[in-house]
């Protein structure tokens, strides 16, 4: 895996200053044992099965794997150190990646915002929209600073917004500069429109994985679909609510912005590598993005209620 080598290099470099090589080797074995312990409790799956909210189904083909809701929540909150209260429906990983060693992963959520009209899709000037996003970002960074979190500034579109009107799928990518990071951050978003809300797929990683994500975006967006009765075409104007935002609003992110979540999840790759490299200090330490920094307490991942083959 691409980060395994980086991890081992970081650990070996640290050991060069650690003194007794025997003690250093024992520490390395213990850190790797912790990784194995974490991964052994996670149940990656392939195949077709319903998502936990019952309104959509995912079909995970060869080349990818999936963590269901309870284990995705464990990874996001406990393993990666995000704020409590996340409600993922699951996570999609490339086959070669894991929660502790990954290129990227798509987190799946659902926003019950109502039926999103797409009448404006052909008329949006995305360059003008980008200017608006940058203006809104100033206030967002003020809030992050008040919360003791790192600021993040959008550089531009990593992949310009594209809306497939036939399949009702919208996707785009932004490039961010995050305070204190040398490498810019990739934020890749997908929205699948439904009768009463949207399925949200989002990947956050370094810009160096953009080509890999774009190469696989078609199979990723085709994995998830609304069940009968919840599809966009099932909308009933007599009974169903219409969302306050249209396509442009989804891209601008006014409804879906989660200041606490994104300010911390942007750090997860370095969190894993640097946390593991901090020999003797615990496998994970939550540093930037939290007012209070604590050592991670290892707990078993919650077991899913049902297993699907």
Image: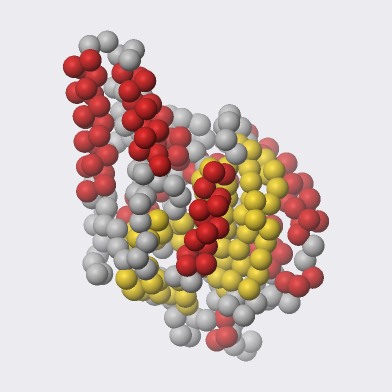
Is any atom of residue 177 visible in this view? yes
Q: Is residue 247 toward the left or the right of residue 55 in the image?
A: right
State the residue lying farthest toward the top. Answer: 19
Please name whichever residue, 69 or 38, is drawn nearer the observer in this view of the structure: 38
Q: Quadrant of residue 25?
A: top left
Residue lying at 57% horizontally and 54% vertically, measured from the top left? 188
Q: Is residue 12 above or below residue 75?
A: above
Q: How many marks?
A: 0
Is any atom of residue 294 visible in this view? no
Q: Is residue 119 above or below residue 16?
A: below
Q: Position of residue 203 (x, y in %)?
A: 51, 53
The figure's colour scheme reads secondary structure
Viewport quadrant of the C terminus: bottom left
Q: Position of residue 53 (x, y in %)?
A: 40, 70
Q: Is residue 48 above or below residue 300?
A: below
Q: Position of residue 85 (x, y in %)?
A: 44, 52
Viewport quadrant of the N terminus: top left
Residue lying at 65% horizontally and 70% vertically, measured from the top left? 163
Q: Is residue 107 toward the left or the right of residue 192 in the image?
A: left
Please name whichever residue, 187 or 292, is drawn nearer the observer in this view of the structure: 187
Residue lying at 41% horizontally and 59% vertically, measured from the top left? 92
Q: Is residue 303 above or below residue 31?
A: below
Q: Is residue 244 toward the left or the right of residue 188 in the image?
A: right
Q: Quadrant of residue 52?
A: bottom left
Q: Position of residue 161 (x, y in %)?
A: 67, 61
Residue lying at 69% horizontally and 75% vertically, measured from the top left? 118
């Amino acid at each position: 895996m691409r980060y395994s080598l980086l991890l081992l290099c970081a650990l070996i470099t640290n050991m060069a200053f650690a003194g007794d090589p025997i003690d250093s080797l024992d520490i390395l074995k213990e850190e790797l044992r912790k990784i194995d312990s974490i991964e052994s409790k996670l149940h990656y799956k392939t195949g077709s099965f319903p998502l936990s909210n019952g309104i959509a189904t995912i079909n995970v083909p060869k080349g990818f794997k999936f963590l269901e809701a309870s284990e995705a929540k464990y990874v996001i909150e406990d393993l990666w150190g995000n704020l409590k209260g996340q409600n993922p429906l699951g996570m999609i990983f490339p086959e070669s990646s894991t929660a502790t060693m990954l290129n990227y992963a798509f987190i799946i959520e659902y926003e019950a915002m109502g039926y999103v009209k797409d009448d404006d899709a052909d008329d949006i000037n995305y360059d003008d929209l980008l200017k608006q996003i940058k203006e809104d970002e100033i206030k967002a960074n003020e809030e992050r600073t008040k919360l003791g979190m790192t600021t993040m500034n959008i550089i531009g579109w990593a992949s310009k917004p594209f809306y497939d009107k036939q399949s009702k799928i919208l996707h785009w990518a932004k490039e961010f500069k995050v305070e204190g990071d040398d490498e810019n951050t990739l934020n890749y978003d997908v929205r699948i429109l439904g009768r009463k809300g949207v399925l949200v797929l989002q990947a956050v990683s370094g810009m160096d994985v953009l080509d890999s994500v774009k190469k696989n975006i078609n199979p990723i967006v085709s994995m998830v679909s609304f069940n009968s009765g919840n599809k966009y075409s099932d909308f009933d104007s007599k009974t169903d609510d219409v969302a306050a935002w249209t396509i442009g609003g989804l891209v601008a992110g006014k409804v879906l912005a989660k200041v606490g979540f994104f300010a911390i999840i942007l750090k997860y790759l370095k969190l894993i590598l640097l946390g593991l490299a901090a020999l003797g200090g615990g496998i994970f330490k939550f540093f930037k993005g939290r007012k209070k920094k604590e050592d991670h307490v290892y707990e078993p991942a919650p077991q899913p209620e049902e297993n699907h083959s």
